[in-house]
Image (cartoon, rainbow, N blue to C red):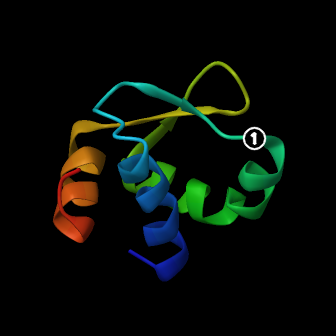
Amino acid sequence: MTSAETKVMEIFRFYGVLPYQMLCLNGKVQQEMQVPLDGLIQKGFVVREGRHDAFHLTQIGYEAVNQAGGAG
């Protein structure tokens, strides 16, 4: 995972997002994080929801979040 992708995953961890729970990012955050978000989507860690600003972690994404930074 790149350092930018790790920063995105830290957002999910900060908010305690579990697998398949939706997280909405404000427009500025999403624009700044679009490249790493795309990378995480390609790796299968994150899925874009129907809304343009909404994403969820997959099970492997959730496991990666907890391995990278610890639970909670």
Quadrant for the N terminus, please: bottom left
30, above or below 58, in the image: below
Q: Secondary structure at mark 1?
A: loop
Identify the residue shown where x is 48% and y is 36%: 47
23, above or below 61, in the image: above
Where residue 14 appears, as percent x and y from the top left, is 41, 51
Q: Quadrant of residue 17?
A: top left
Q: In the depicted view, which residue is nearer to us: 59 or 11? A: 11
Image position of 27 (left or right of 51)? right
- Residue type marked 1: Asn
Identify the residue shown where x is 20% and y is 57%: 66
The residue at the far top in this view is: 50
Q: Quadrant of residue 53?
A: top right
Q: Find disc 1 in the rendering and name its residue.
A: 26
Image position of 52 (left or right of 7)? right
Where residue 27 appears, as percent x and y from the top left, is 82, 43
**Badge count:** 1
Identify the residue shown where x is 58% and y is 55%: 37
Where residue 44 appears, as percent x and y from the top left, is 37, 47
Identify the residue shown where x is 46% and y is 79%: 2
Crowding at mark 1 (Cα within 10 Å: few <14, some 14-19, many 20+): few
